[in-house]
Amino acid sequence: MKTKMIIVAAPSGAGKSSFVERIAAEDARLHDIITYTTRAMRHHESQGKPYFFIPKDEFDKKVGEDFFIEWAQVHTNFYGTSYEQVQLAWAKDKVVIMDIDIQGVVTFKSKFPDAKTVFILPPSIEELKRRVIKRDGAPPPDLDVRMANAEKEMAKASEFDVRIVNDDFERSYTEFKKIVENWIG
Ligand code: 5GP
């Protein structure tokens, strides 16, 4: 059976959102769902791009209303995926693709065992650190927390269906696309 859900995980800064955003733009069978966060917007971000940015009290209210399939604290903020976003994609007969953290992957796999999982690895922790600083324009306040979490997450890479090292984006993306196309038929 072809999968209806593809989950991409990676340490923050490994480039997973670039993989997901590009493939969703190139392949109309896929729908990149928007998740919710309490984190502050970065420059270049806006409401719905790439998250629905909501205050913590609203997030807590949604948790209480069972609005999320899964939610997790990632670094110092909260993130959650709604049933609504997944259902909207499936109603259009699309395959859901999304990038979430590793805690979310465990929850999704328990609720949707047929979901396919991809782990994107940075070439090294040093390179990951460099990319995060470059992306944010300065070292983020929680850089050390992020790097410590990255090492913990990378230790779980073997539990995923496939692993891709993002050394050269074009090369890695081609590998990623081939795998995803094979899954969705
Ligand atoms: P960032 O704040 O750097 O955009 O993302 C931080 C982390 O949160 C990333 O690893 C991202 O994949 C993850 N994330 C985004 N949305 C969700 C979600 O709905 N659930 C979970 N568990 N993680 C998420």
Image (cartoon, helix red, strand yellow):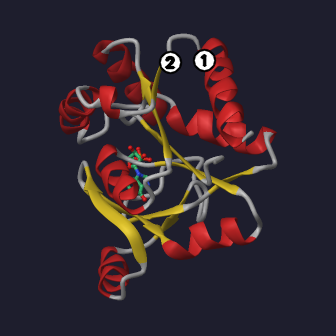
Q: Find residue 183 and report its image quarter.
A: top right
In-image side of 143 versus 167 (left or right): left
Q: Amino acid at mark 2?
A: Asn
The x, y position of residue 50, in whole percent, is 57, 54
The residue that appears at 69% across and 31% down in the rendered structure is 182
Observer-nearest of 118 and 4:
4
In-image side of 50 versus 121 (left or right): right
Label 2 secondary element: loop
Label 1 secondary element: helix
Check the image and report above or below for 141 versus 37: above
Q: Amino acid at mark 1?
A: Phe
The residue that appears at 61% across and 33% down in the rendered structure is 19
Q: Residues within 10 Å of mark 1 (few under 14, many from 20)?
A: few
Distance from disc 2 to disc 1, alpha carbons, whole Å, reads 6 Å
Q: Residues within 10 Å of mark 2 (few under 14, many from 20)?
A: many
Q: Which residue in the protein does label 1 denote?
A: 169
Observer-nearest of 21 and 39:
21
Residue 182 tag number: none
The x, y position of residue 125, in whole percent, is 29, 17
In-image side of 57 versus 164 (left or right): left
Q: Find residue 131 and report its image quarter.
A: top left
Observer-nearest of 12 and 112:
112
Q: Which residue in the protein does label 2 denote?
A: 166
The residue that appears at 77% across and 67% down in the rendered structure is 92
The x, y position of residue 116, in whole percent, is 51, 42
